[in-house]
Amino acid sequence: MSTLTTHEPSAPDAKSLYLPKGYEAQDTNVTLDANRDDEGYWSPWRISQSGKYQSHVYDWAERLIRRTGFTRVLDVGCGVATKLERSIAPTGATIVGIDQPSAVANCNRLDRTGTFLEVDLEKPSFEPDEPFDLVIFADVVEHLVNPAPAMAMIQRVVARDGLVLISTPERNRRRGRTCRKSEKPEHVREWAQNEFVRFVKSCGFCVHASRLMPQDDMPWSRGLIREIGFQARLLKRSPFACHTVLCGLG
């Protein structure tokens, strides 16, 4: 029988998160950590697919590291660290990943490069010895009932002159412009691009860039026709539905 782990912290209201009037958030954070099927959540097929999504976010992170010479990288909600191993480990940066117990166990089992720690992102108590030059927070914030503690933790652990990459599904492009509730039960809420930028700024970050990327490892050129159709309102959805912001502390 499948087992679900749920968290029930107090959820902020839609207005404080810059969501539209009438938006319906999920009541709980359904974290499919213990079991999804008989093989567990991180089954072989899921691990094999783990490098596919948010691929362009990690490519951006790699370029930032090589351009700036950053040496310490934190991945908040690292999963099984497939993209860290592929894109970030070759840079030579020191890697730390934090996530739920099953993800950390698989990182260690798969001998991923880096240090991996169990942290509950609904109520994180992570306090590193040194700050990080770059923090990656890729498609995790939408899973949290109250994202404020995780956002505050990121502010604490990033270096004063460091950078943060935060990605999340762009609601209008992923679900359609009329969507007012996520179709995916694991997602507590989803933001449109302008809403999410306002939310990130409200958490005390300075947004340097806001980009729309393919959701998976699809080449950018393959989605351009559908993106044009979306912008012309001929199509309801666009493959450029991964919204990523690059931000810092000021």
Image (cartoon, grey):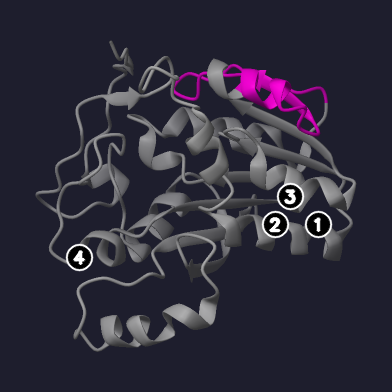
Viewer-side residue, 45 vs 216 = 45
What secondary structure is the magenta-colored segment mainly? loop
Q: Between tags 4 and 1, which lies in front?
A: 4
Mark 4 / mark 3, whichever is N-terminal: 3
Name the residue carrying label 2. Answer: 61
Name the residue carrying label 3. Answer: 86
Image quadrant holding the C terminus, namely: bottom right
Cα–Cα span, label 4 and label 2: 28 Å
Instruction: Answer whether labels 1 and 2 touch (C-beta < 8 Å).
Output: yes
Name the residue carrying label 1. Answer: 65
Q: Is residue 111 magenta?
A: yes
Residue at x 76% of width, y 32% of height:
112
Mark 2 / mark 3, whichever is N-terminal: 2
Q: Between tags 2 and 3, which lies in front?
A: 3
Mark 3 / mark 1, whichever is N-terminal: 1
Mark 4 / mark 2, whichever is N-terminal: 2
The answer to which quarter of the image holds residue 177 is bottom left
Cα–Cα span, label 4 and label 1: 34 Å
The percent coordinates of residue 99 (x first, y second) are 57, 25
Q: Which residue range is magenta in the image?
A: 104-129
Give, as a three-letter code, the residue at label 3: Arg
Query: Which of the labelled discs sits on residue 176, or is there none?
Result: 4
Cα–Cα span, label 2 and label 3: 12 Å
